[in-house]
Image: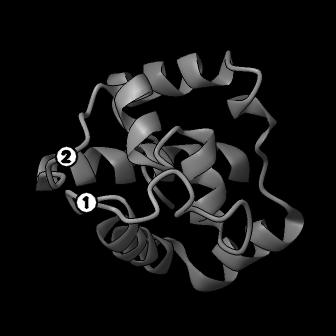
Amino acid sequence: MAGTGGPGIQDMLNRLSASDFRRRFRLTEKDKAYIRDKGWDTVRRHAYDLIGKRLAPAAIPNDGRQTPMRGHPVFIAQHATATCCRGCLYKWHRIPPGAALTQAQQDYVIALILAWLARQMQ
């Protein structure tokens, strides 16, 4: 199972859950079954791949529209955790746009996504 993240991750998840918009996101039974079937290691690999391609680059041509609202549990988690675009990443996490995400920033985003997914799986 995925880790629940450290205190900073849990504090951020609590802050996000106070947002009317962010707290409306929930995994469907199909999403939960996907996580159970594929396992946490695969979901983590998918998250790193999706973040690396869609959020980490310095310039994202379709920023603000690059993350679908459905189709993969990571996409849902990105909206719930405000890691869906560089604008939300800055507003909620103070990670500025215009520069590629560092490995530490990507690790933070993935930890947040996995912690949110773990909460949803409970």
Q: Looking at the image, is mark 1 or mark 2 earlier in the sequence?
A: 1
Asked which secondary structure carries label 2, the reply is loop
- The picture places residue 83, in percent across and down from the top left corner, at 46, 45
Q: In terms of image quadrants, where is residue 53?
A: bottom left
Residue wearing tag 1: 59
Who's the residue at 35% across and 47% down the image? 109
Amino acid on which disc 2 is placed: Gly
Res. 79 mark: none
In the image, 91: left or right of 31? left
Residue wearing tag 2: 98
Q: Judge whether residue 122 can be spotted in this image.
A: no
Who's the residue at 57% across and 44% down the image? 116
98 and 19: which one is in front?
A: 98
Question: CB under 8 Å between callouts 1 and 2?
Answer: yes
Asked which secondary structure carries label 1, the reply is loop
Amino acid on which disc 1 is placed: Ala
